[in-house]
């Protein structure tokens, strides 16, 4: 079935046809420019920067991320996510241009996968998602309904949505799915009753035979559609090549008829992206609010002490080194920390925020040690001084004591004087002998 679709192209330079040879050359130039513009609309890829941008709720940490939303990004292929975010529980990829389910088998904890409004034509490569509980495939191009049999081993799958796919037109569509995936509790946002399940199980083989015939006919129609769409696009390109007015070319493209298929969706998205890039005004440096850069040094060249992130720290001045303990976030990825040790200051950049501290004495940058605790995540920086301070011990000056004279020498030095009582020296005569 054909429907009115909108197709646009980017800006195309004008040329004047003066002869049949020039006219042919003009058409070739037009087709070459159109092909070049299509190539310029490079496929949007899943990059680390894009994933970190979408993980601001987790302090831009992707290794511990449990929920990721990449909807409406014109992504055409699933890649890298299973290697960067293995702990994901929720993955939202709706409203993109994804043509195939792939590169997800390492996400053992994934519970909810949303790939609605994409270009997917069959269900595959989801057998390893042990924890998958909900799968949303709304408004795709799934015609191979028997591909749901690959989900039989996903024992935790409770909810499946296939609304808006070509397969919903097949007879016994719901009965076949309900009778094949016995673990489901809800299908197409409608609860599955026990009686409905039992009834579907009885006739699942007969329903499957009918489904196979329907999807074989649909596959033939799909192959014919691919050829037909390619011819329509070539004919439209030749028609626009004969037009000199750029606005007329655009009007012809936008008013042309096309079919609803993955190729047209992808082409429309690329042309929209080219149109946005063309009509985006160039940034005006006078009106653009530039991010204010911090002033790191005084006019005399002395480094300032700065703590933009307001991180707790402890700075110690020892005899031969400085010791800095910076309490960075425990689960912060080390790749987001940059340390710059200079002779008179040290600068630590944490997630783009600067911590800088100056010291009075010069240090040896090449002998400095930077370590991070695996338990607390704190950063320990040891800065060796260029000239180690000597410990000055103040000793009190003591006068030497005079040595005490010998008793004999003192007696000799002192002459006797006074009266001597002989009774204190000799015993009295009447003292009896004591035995």
Image: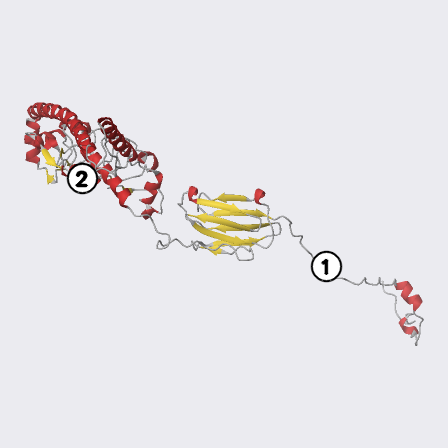
**Residue 189 in the image: x percent, y percent?**
12, 40
Q: Please say if the residues under marks 1 and 2 sit with CB atoms less than 8 Å apart.
A: no
Query: Residue 201, how many percent across, how many down?
Result: 8, 28
Q: How many marks?
A: 2
Here the colouring is secondary structure
The N terminus, quarter of image: top left
Between tags 1 and 2, which lies in front?
2
Q: Secondary structure at mark 1?
A: loop
Camera-nearest residue between 130 and 309: 309
Q: Where on the picture, by quarter, is residue 71?
A: top left
The residue pinned by badge 1 equals 395
> Looking at the rendering, which quadrant does residue 360 occupy?
bottom right
Near-viewer residue (344 or 297):
297
Q: Which residue is farthest bottom? A: 419
| Residue 332 appearing in the image | yes
Q: Is residue 6 visible?
A: no
First of labels 1, 2 by sequence position: 2
- Report x, y in % for residue 426: 92, 70
**Disc 1/disc 2 C-alpha distance (Å):** 100 Å
- Depicted 380 relative to depicted 76: above or below: below
Q: Is residue 212 above or below residue 108?
A: above
Residue 422 at x, y = what percent?
93, 73
Residue 268 shown left or right of residue 331 in the figure: left
| Residue underneath mark 2 | 248
């Amino acid at each position: 079935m054909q429907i009115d679709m909108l197709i646009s192209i980017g800006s195309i330079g004008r040329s004047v046809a003066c002869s049949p040879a020039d006219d042919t050359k003009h058409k070739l130039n037009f087709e070459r420019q159109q092909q070049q513009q299509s190539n310029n609309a490079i496929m949007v890829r899943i990059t680390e920067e894009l994933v970190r941008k979408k993980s601001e709720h987790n302090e831009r940490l992707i290794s511990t991320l449990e929920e990721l939303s990449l909807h409406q990004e014109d992504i055409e292929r699933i890649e890298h996510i299973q290697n960067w975010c293995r702990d994901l529980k929720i993955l939202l990829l709706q409203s993109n241009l994804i043509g195939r389910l792939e590169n997800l088998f390492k996400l053992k904890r994934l519970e909810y996968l949303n790939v609605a409004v994409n270009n997917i034509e069959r269900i595959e490569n989801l057998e390893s998602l042990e924890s998958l509980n909900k799968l949303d495939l709304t408004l795709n191009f799934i015609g191979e309904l028997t591909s749901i049999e690959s989900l039989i081993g996903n024992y935790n799958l409770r909810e499946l949505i296939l609304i808006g796919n070509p397969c919903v037109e097949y007879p016994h569509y719901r009965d076949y799915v309900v009778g094949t995936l016995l673990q489901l509790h809800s299908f197409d946002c409608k609860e599955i009753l026990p009686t409905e399940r039992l009834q579907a199980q009885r006739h699942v083989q007969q329903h499957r035979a009918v489904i196979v015939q329907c999807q074989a006919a649909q596959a033939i129609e799909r192959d014919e559609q691919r050829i037909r769409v390619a011819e329509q696009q070539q004919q439209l390109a030749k028609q626009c090549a004969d037009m000199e007015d750029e606005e007329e070319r655009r009007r012809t493209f936008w008013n042309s008829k096309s079919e609803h298929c993955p190729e047209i969706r992808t082409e429309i998205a690329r042309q929209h992206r080219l149109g946005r890039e063309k009509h985006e005004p160039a940034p005006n440096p006078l009106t653009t609010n530039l991010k204010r850069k911090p002033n790191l040094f005084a006019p005399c060249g002395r480094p300032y002490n700065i703590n933009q992130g307001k991180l707790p720290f402890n700075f110690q001045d020892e005899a031969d080194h400085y010791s800095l303990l910076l309490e960075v976030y425990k689960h912060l990825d080390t790749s987001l920390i940059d340390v710059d040790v200079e002779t008179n200051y040290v600068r630590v950049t944490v997630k783009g925020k600067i911590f800088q501290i100056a010291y009075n004495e010069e240090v040896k940058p090449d002998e400095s040690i930077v370590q991070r605790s695996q338990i607390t995540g704190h950063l320990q920086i040891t800065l060796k001084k260029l000239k180690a301070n000597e410990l000055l011990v103040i000793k009190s000056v003591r006068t030497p004591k005079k040595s005490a004279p010998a008793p004999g020498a003192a007696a000799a030095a002192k002459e006797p004087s006074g009266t001597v009582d002989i009774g204190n020296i000799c015993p009295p005569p009447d003292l009896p002998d004591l035995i």
